[in-house]
Structures are given as C-alpha cells and as structure tokens.
Amino acid sequence: MRYSFSNCVLDSDRHLLVRDGKQVRVEPQVFDLLHLLVRNAGVLVTRDQIIDEIWGGRIVSESSISARINAARKAVGDNGKEQSIVKTVPRRGLQLGTSVSMDREGEPAPSPALSDRQRVRFAKSDDGTSIAYATSGHGPMIMRAGHFLTHLEMDWKSLIWRPYLNALGQDHTLVRYDQRGTGLSDPILSNTVLDSHVADLEAVANAAGLDRFPLIALSQGVPIAIQFAANHPERVSCLVLYGGYTEGRALRDGGQSSEAADAMMTLMREGWGKPESAFMRAFTSLFCPEASLDQLADLVDMQLASTSPENAGRIRMAIDRFTVVDQLENIQVPTLVIHSRNDSVHPLSEGQKLASNIARAELVVLESANHILLPGENAWSEWARATLEFLDRTSALE
C-alpha cells in the first residue's frame, strides 16, 4: 500500500519514504511510527498504541519515544514547533495533521522515485559455474558477499531482506549475488570448498566492473570476504562483517559430532520449507527466535525458492568447515565487526576473535538473540546506523 500525504509518499511494501520526489533514509522504527500514523489518519494514536506497535509492548524510556517522534517529524519536513504534519495531543498521543490518500500495488506510482528496480545479470566463475548477481541503488559501489538463503528476485520483495537492501542502496550502488547452488545461480552444486566461493565473489566483482570497493558480509559470507581480502588486498577498501566466524562449527572447540551433523541433515531433508516441521522449529529458534509469523512465512518461502534440500545440506556441511584463522593477520583495511550478543548460530566469541585478530578492527555488539536481524527490532536500526556511518567515514579516507 502507498500512502500520499502533504509532499510525502510512504510505500509500506517497499519500506520507502519519499519527500518532494526524493527518497528519505529513515530507521525501521521511525518508518513504523509513520506507517502507524498514516494508517490511522485523523484518529488519535495513543502512547500505549505506539509502544505496542513499535516496541512490542516492551518497557521503553520517554527519551526513546521522543527521539523516534522527532526523527519522524524531521523525515517528513515537520518540526516540534510547527507540528503541521505530526501533531502532539498533550498527555494523550499523536495524530496525523494532514489528509492521506491510498493506492495499492499495481496502480501508477505517485512518484518516480518509487519506480526503483534492480538489474540482474550473470557472471562465470573460474570453474564455469553461472553466478547471478544484481545491482541496485544509487551512488558509490559496494558489494555484499554471497551467503545462505538468498534469491535475488524474492529478496527484492522480502519482509526481511528488502529493508536491508533499501538501507544499503540509499546512498550506494549495491552489488550482491546468489551463491552457487542457490537462487538464480547455477543449481548444480559442483564444488563447495571455500576457494570456489571466493572465486565466485571475484567473478561477480569483475563482471560488475568493481575495482576497489567496500565489502560487506553476513554469516558464512564473512570467511569468504576475509579470504578474498587476503588474496586481493588492493581491491578491498574496507570490510563490514556481521554475525561471522573464524572457524566453522565443525572445527570449533569440541567440534560437531557426526551424529549431530547427520541429525541436522535428516531434519533438513524432511523439513526444508515446511513451516510446521521440527527443522523449521529448530531453524527459527537458532537463526531468528524473535521472528513474527509473517517473517517466519517469509523465511519458509525463501527456503523453498532458494535451493533444494539436498543442496542446502551440502552447503551447510561445507560452511561448517570454513576456516580463515590464518588469514586474519593479513587483513590491513578498516574493518567493522558487528555481532549479536546472544547469537546462537555463531556465538559472540567468534565476533570477538575476528575483532581482536584483525588490525585496528572495531567491534559493535548488538542487543539481540537473532542471527538474521529482523526489521523493526532495535538491533536492526543499530546495525544500519553503524554500517552506514562506517561506510561514510572510511570513504572519506580513500
């Protein structure tokens, strides 16, 4: 749904705010507050409603609420003195002070800025594997390393991944790709070793015309990005590493027993893409225990579209044996390490190992249990702020 009010358009599907024809960057909670107000145009939205919708009913300070309200006003060109759009009703709540018109997806967009799209192309890795990659956004080029559970077309519509792509693409041209055996890339999984994934990243960088660029990586993409940066230090200007690891789960202290690995493989084969399966319960409890029902459905759809149960199992077994312990000392570029404090997939200790063994790396710890950060949680906003500020800061040094 798109909501037009004053000189603004809020697109709930694409998680976009446009003012005077230009996209405005807003944090997820600020967007959610504006979405709540436009959905209830002309009706008082109480403080309790705001807390329930934006913070899930959790205890929150008055300063946090005020900060989000002030940010919402600024985003739509309003301020606390004039309150021409977002009005405060003393001791009661907020009200949108302007009329709102609505139109649904498929009707003509009210602003050219909402007709953004991605461009999908293909690169050939050194073993002949076809790797699908996409470019989107505007500005200096950045790249995201491939990782588990992506599909270029579905990510573009995903409740979980589209806000992430919007955040990175507001001031940058983002290049990302589906890793081998998944998404739009070659479904035949001929090789799963770390070097083959690094070669895929290089093939996409070459095809997209990237020379020296910031490299962003999540989860299993972290060792891939580190290995690429160690192999090609002249091509990487900085690294942003979220939820990563130095050694896969099978190589860490104690390792992963063959029985545990076999059990996980069986669960994946039997429950891949099935919301009520034991595998999905295990998956969500590990990867995103705080996911809503809609977000869970989004992940299930992504599983089915991204890859087959057989490929998923092979990829999982391979990435559990990735290691870049010996490469960390070779990383000399500015590096930001971000990790959720209660991540059950790759524990915080792995993030701390990355930060302590990469020269001058910065560490940001997020208060979350989610390995896949969820739009709407405070940690997602902190991730976006830290990442974008780091990219801005390091680009000024180039």
Image (cartoon, rainbow, N blue to C red):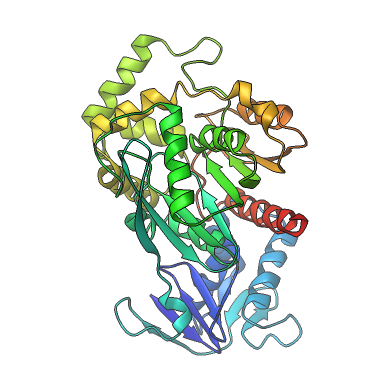
Question: How many numbered circles are shown?
Answer: 0
Residue drawn 57% across and 65% down? 50
The C terminus - image quarter: bottom right
Q: Is 301 drawn above or below residue 39 in the view shown?
A: above
Q: Is 149 drawn above or below residue 265 in the view shown?
A: below
Q: Quadrant of residue 70?
A: bottom right
Q: Nearer the viewer, residue 175 or 291?
A: 175
Q: Is residue 40 visible to the viewer in this orientation of the structure?
A: no
Q: Is residue 177 visible to the viewer in this orientation of the structure?
A: yes
Q: Which of 56 and 108 is in front in this view?
A: 108
Q: Position of residue 112 (x, y in %)?
A: 45, 83
Q: Where is residue 132 in the image (x, y as percent from the top left)?
A: 34, 51
Residue drawn 57% across and 63% down? 172
Q: Quadrant of residue 262?
A: top left
Q: Is 11 drawn above or below residue 108 in the view shown?
A: above
Residue pushed farthest left?
Answer: 270
Question: In the picture provided, is 363 more to the left or to the right than 260?
Answer: right
Residue drawn 48% across and 34% down? 220
Q: Where is residue 279 in the image (x, y as percent from the top left)?
A: 31, 30
